[in-house]
Every structure is written in C-alpha cells, then in structure tokens.
Image (spheres, rainbow, N blue to C red):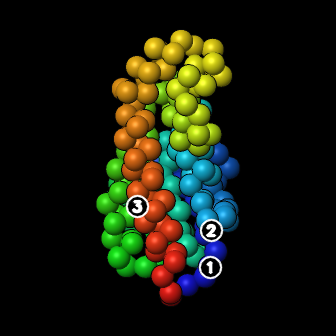
C-alpha cells in the first residue's frame, strides 16, 4: 500500500457542479489528514457529501467511497491495517452522522472547536455571540462527544499507520 493519504468526497445527491457526483481527491499530510476532512464536513454552505480518508491511492479512495455509499455512511476512514480499520469502520460513520445532523450555526461552532482548537469563550468572541449561546449550541450539537470520537479516530489512525504493511 502506498504511504500517501487521499481525501475524496462525493455529493449525496445530484448537484449543478460540473462533475455532478465527486470532488477531485487530494493528498493530505499523513500525520493528520482530519482538519481537511472536518473543514469539508462542517462547511455550512456545502451540499451534503460523504467523505473518505484513505491511506493509499485515488483508486483506494474511490473504493472506500463506494463502500461508504453502500453502507450509507457520511465518513469512512481506512488505514489498510485490518484491526485499525475494524475500529475505524465503527467510529468514523458515527462521527460523520453526528456532524451531518448539526445546524449551520452549530457547524460554525463545531468547526471553531474541532478544527481551530478554540475554547467556547474564544468562539463566542470570534462569532460575536454570547458565551451562553455558544454553550447551548455546543451541548445540543454534541461537540464534546464529536471531539472524543475524533480523538479516538485520530489515535486509531496513527496506530494503523505505525504498523508495518
């Protein structure tokens, strides 16, 4: 298996985009490809999509997207290491669903916390809203739970990459 990491996405339904179902895959840093995937999953303006984060080639990413489509998962993560992939097959779809169920306002807050690493008070200042409003949205969107899942996914990803091919 290649040492490259590929992130690929496809729209859940037909859109007016030039290629109506898929975005071009892009390579990401092997250490942590998740900021790019989270940016895409949490973009309040984007159409609903499914995403694959795969250690391997574009073909591997397309195969993972096909598996995600058949299972109706919003996020799939594959390292190529069977034990890690078994855990990731359970964790990543839950995170994808959790993020997909957020409102646009909750996504902005989750993005600031999960991608930018901001605290709730910093999010309130950055978005110009009250701290209690951020706290309520944070709780209702289950951002803490999403952060815990993300931490488990990152640790499993790193462990899967550390094992020999």
Q: Which marked residue is nearer to the observer: mark 1 or mark 3?
A: 1
Q: Circle 3 is placed at which residue position?
A: 68
One can see residue 113 in this view: yes
- Side of 73 relative to 127 (left or right): left
The residue located at (51%, 16%) in the rendering is 131
Q: Circle 2 is placed at which residue position?
A: 30
| Distance between the alpha carbons at the discs numbered 2 and 1 | 8 Å
Q: Nearer the viewer, residue 41 or 83?
A: 83
Numbered marks: total:
3
| Distance between the alpha carbons at the discs numbered 3 and 2 | 21 Å
Give the percent coordinates (x, y) of residue 164.
Answer: 50, 87
Residue count near mark 2 (Cα–Cα under 10 Å), binned few <14, some 14–19, many ≥20: some
Q: Earlier in the sequence, mark 3 or mark 2?
A: 2
Give the percent coordinates (x, y) of residue 120.
Answer: 52, 26
Q: Circle 1 is placed at which residue position?
A: 3
The residue located at (51%, 34%) in the rendering is 110
């Amino acid at each position: 298996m290649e040492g490259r990491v590929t992130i690929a996405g496809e729209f859940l339904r037909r859109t007016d985009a030039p290629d109506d179902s898929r975005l071009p895959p892009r390579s990401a840093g092997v250490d942590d490809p998740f900021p790019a995937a989270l940016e895409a999953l949490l973009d309040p303006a984007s159409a609903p999509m499914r995403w694959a984060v795969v250690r391997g080639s574009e073909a591997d990413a397309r195969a993972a997207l096909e598996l995600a489509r058949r299972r109706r998962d919003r996020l799939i993560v594959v390292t190529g290491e069977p034990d890690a992939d078994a855990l990731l097959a359970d964790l990543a779809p839950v995170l994808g669903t959790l993020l997909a169920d957020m409102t646009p306002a909750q996504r902005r807050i989750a993005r600031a916390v999960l991608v930018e690493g901001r605290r709730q008070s910093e999010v309130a200042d950055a978005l110009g809203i009250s701290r209690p409003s951020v706290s309520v949205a944070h709780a209702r969107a289950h951002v803490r739970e999403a952060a815990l899942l993300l931490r488990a996914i990152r640790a499993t990803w790193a462990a899967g990459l550390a094992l020999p091919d």
